[in-house]
Amino acid sequence: TLRHVLLRFGEDWIFLFLLGISMAIISFGLDVTIAKLQRMNLWVYDSLNNYLYLQYFSWVLYHVLLMMISAGVAKYISPQAAGSGIPELKVTLRGVVLAEFFTFRTFVAKLIGVTCTLAAGSTIFLGKVGPFVHMATILATLLGKLMVKIVGAKENPSRKYELLIAGAAVGVACCFVAPVGGVLFSVEATATHFAVRNYWRGFFAATCAALMFRLLAVIKSERETVAVLFNTNWRVEFPFDLPEYFSYALLGVVCGCVCCVYLFLHRVTLLFLNNNERVGKLLRNNKIVYAALVSFILASITFPHGFGQYMGGTRLTMKEHLEMFFNNVTWGIEELSVNVSASRQPPNPSYDNNFLQWMHPNMSAIEKLAIFIVLKFFMLLLANTMIIPAGYFLPVFVYGAGLGRLYGEIMAKIFPEGIISEGINIKITPAGYALAGAAAYSGAVTQTLSTALLVFELTGQMSHILPVLIAVLIANAISQSCQNSFFDLIIIIKKLPYLPKLTMGRSSAHDIRAEDFMITDLLYLVKGFKYKDVRNLLKTSELRQFPIVDAEESKILLGTVSRKTLSKRLSDQLSTERRIQFMLNRG
Amino acid sequence: TLRHVLLRFGEDWIFLFLLGISMAIISFGLDVTIAKLQRMNLWVYDSLNNYLYLQYFSWVLYHVLLMMISAGVAKYISPQAAGSGIPELKVTLRGVVLAEFFTFRTFVAKLIGVTCTLAAGSTIFLGKVGPFVHMATILATLLGKLMVKIVGAKENPSRKYELLIAGAAVGVACCFVAPVGGVLFSVEATATHFAVRNYWRGFFAATCAALMFRLLAVIKSERETVAVLFNTNWRVEFPFDLPEYFSYALLGVVCGCVCCVYLFLHRVTLLFLNNNERVGKLLRNNKIVYAALVSFILASITFPHGFGQYMGGTRLTMKEHLEMFFNNVTWGIEELSVNVSASRQPPNPSYDNNFLQWMHPNMSAIEKLAIFIVLKFFMLLLANTMIIPAGYFLPVFVYGAGLGRLYGEIMAKIFPEGIISEGINIKITPAGYALAGAAAYSGAVTQTLSTALLVFELTGQMSHILPVLIAVLIANAISQSCQNSFFDLIIIIKKLPYLPKLTMGRSSAHDIRAEDFMITDLLYLVKGFKYKDVRNLLKTSELRQFPIVDAEESKILLGTVSRKTLSKRLSDQLSTERRIQFMLNRG
């Protein structure tokens, strides 16, 4: 009967519905857990108010412990759970099967690991998107197998592909409660070609997920509304001046350049750790110790009563950071009003008023933001070297928002009355630049465009669509012409099969044929080869695998043989014992 | 040197830039021309204030003349310019070459025709999207050829395909100043599979187009802002109540059902006109007279001093209709306040205050809207039968907005205090329903999802994303399970090569193989056939074309021969004269 119900409604719809709902519940549960852990940390920290060393100890211990659990999970439960998961998914969607990548064991490891990573908050500064995409695709695979069993249909590779795409969309949609941007981002980040009919599946599942996520938030009365995550309420009629287009374009250039430096340094770091034998070996054997070391350094920097007080927002979560950056208030002005009402300034920063985290008696918020931007750049590079389950999209997204905010605040300082156009005086909205910065920087790092949509779905206002799109396009153009995308970089470094992108913007790519770059002087074994031929072949080439063909003329491929097997067989056949045996038999 | 400049920057970027800019200029020029024509009509109409018959005459004459020009252009300059162009583009992207479809002649015909069609405004109620997509693809083809000539590269079919996709995106983006929605809608409406790298081209070109369009509007100081077309300024925190999700879902069901009836009647009408020999012949021979007749009927209905006064908004353009429907005011309340200030009510409706077009001494605005919805349904069916260059997306979009508005106004009447949830009193926003209605109805008719994005880009606010997505998904599910999409319908009726969609939501589609539905008892000519065999073949089958194979066993296809040629040759060979000749020769 269950089978009939499924077939009646179309088992795919039910599958997508279940997938969306369950990922939303997981995402929501995760968020609640993380918030509890972070509050607990801050509560302990604040309780130790008079003991600076104990405060430092508790702060560092919290982060080091979480990172050790995260690294331990990746080491002992499932090594495939380490990292983002998006590069591997990309490779899978291109047809390469990765062992153990879609198993329940990996799912559990990823869930535990990412909970710890996220609970470490903005000190470790790692994210949620990649692991959620990975978890959603695992769930899609497992659910798909279950469905196939109930319905009794055959497993089908192209169907699996469709389910994976839908899973990826759900994963992104869950993180941002952004169904449309989620679908598009997952397509851009993972696929190269794409069937329009899959689009539907993604949308349906992502909408279910987003709806469920918001309903859960309302039920828990954490939020009293089902609306967007980060409200903005800008002037709709004149959100920005016409000359500000240039300013947004310049922000795109800035984001693109910073992104290129980031990607370059990221590659250099990872290559160093991989290729330097001593360091690499040390790292591979002591993943947990390394994670503890890195988190110790990071937590020491962000210690709120130490250097952290010059950095700004060290006690905030990633989400609170975004709230700050997208806030429709010019900091330079807000700051003044806060200073006037001295009663609002508590002796110690507390988590009640996020903006107070950016205040300091001797420094302006913009200076603190500048330090934040510079330091986080290197801290993120360091954090990326840990081998733990973690996403790399949210950090660059938040970082980009900070970069844009800094740019916007500086613009607002330079043009306090706004850029004048046609007699209308429009003040500059730094939050608009934060929006554009987030979209442009994260778009440039991942080399996708749909980040523009993500920011609009997050804020619920689309008035900045054109300036944001311009910034995203420019940042992307710069990044694509200099570097591989973040995900492609990992594919290359992990030595997974990599398909390079076609050069954009030039028609010449269309005139390249397979014969232009294929190897024509092939080495192969023919069925009728003699021992001598085999020996010559082994001598002349360094290949690890040799193709076997049926005849020199037809060259029909029969299979491959590894160098190892081949040389072993050859030496077996031509060994001294064999020769003696042969002689004896003959004689 | 031009060649070097092009190659240096990447000729594709320049191509896309030029394409976007020129389409934006054409779109803007068209809008200005149309506005001028419409103002002129209303000016003449109002000048004849005291002569009712002359008013009627001028009103009808204006519309009939425009439609006759439009039909004449399609008949005499280029028959390929008739209709929307999207169905043909869809067929082209699937690899079928249509003659004369991408020529400059067609471009000119389409431009003149669509100007006339659009100038006829909401009386004829036809749109702009399809023709603009067609024109943009023509421009893309022509520009592509020019580029190829300058750069000296070879023409390449896959490159052509990419240019067409970019062209389609620009076309949609120009109409709605919506780059993201434009790209997605064009992909959904035209393609089945799609390379992610083409996405970029579309975005870049569409952004250029949208930017240019807005800049032109600012330069002409028609609008003083570069912001969105239709501003909405809803409450961001509580844009709607939680129980309203059900209400939006119900609107989706309504839109889906109305859409099914519409598509069904549309098919029946077109099939009748095509299959009924007398009517069909009459129509084909008198396209211009038919267009005049239809526009005469439509203009008679909308005559503002006649029946038009009960219908509402007959003097408004399509754009003004949308402005009305998306306006953030509850009509039922607005109406009362207008009635109080009697001075605001002029004796005759004028185009100064659009809302006054919906007022009547004896009727409420909602009643007028209901009449509008019922009548426009049939008027649109009638208008669709004319063979003129015209788009069919904008009318269903506006119609959907009206439908949603009506639904929303009724909801606001039933729940004047809003649907109560958790003690917060949120009034119902009828404009939100208009938004959802527009997206759901137009999405259902064209069977696309990206209409949801279009409405957000039009209004600049995304707070309603989830309810709108839900309505769109439901309407689409209903429409897809009952009817073919509007564009597919035209493909089928025009007897262009049609690829049916795979059934959604069921995995069974994956288990169908070519052998399951291919015809295996083929009829063919073998090279060695005798006259008798050929005669038998002609007798047993009704095929118009016969394949010729080399031998019964190998069945290698050599070519085809038409029935006509075959029977002619056969009768030539076996004619009485031949036989006598044969006998004589023998004797």
Image (cartoon, coloured by chain):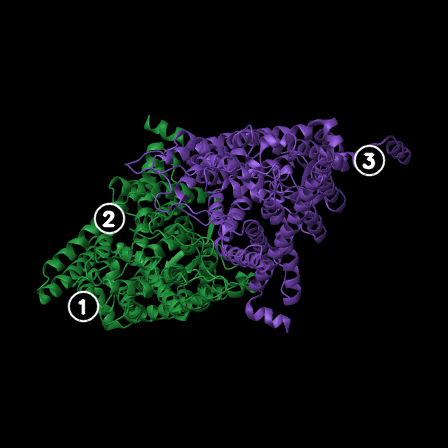
Chain colours: A green, B purple
Dot 3 corresponds to which residue?
A: B573
* Left-right relation of B204 to B151: left
Q: Pinpoint the chain carrying mark 1.
A: A
Q: Amino acid at mark 1?
A: Ser
Q: How much space separates mark 2 and mark 1, taking CA atoms?
A: 26 Å
Residue A325 has which mark? none
Dot 1 corresponds to which residue?
A: A300
**Along the line of sight, the residue nearer the viewer: A349 or A465:** A349
* Left-right relation of A294 to B129: left
Q: Where does the image place residue B293, in percent across and percent down from the top left?
A: 72, 32
At mark 2, the secondary structure is helix
Q: Where does the image place residue A135, in percent across and percent down from the top left?
A: 30, 48
Q: Where does the image place residue A400, in percent across and percent down from the top left?
A: 36, 63
Q: Where does the image place residue B528, in percent across and percent down from the top left?
A: 71, 39
Q: Residue at x 35, y 29 (%)?
A: A3
* Label 2 vs 1, first from the N-terminus: 2
**Along the line of sight, the residue nearer the viewer: A99 or B208:** B208
Mark 1 and mark 3 residues within 8 Å of each other at the beta carbon:
no
Q: Is residue B585 above or below residue B109?
A: above
Residue A30 has which mark? 2
Quarter location, residue A546: bottom left
Q: Residue at x 29, y 67 (%)?
A: A365
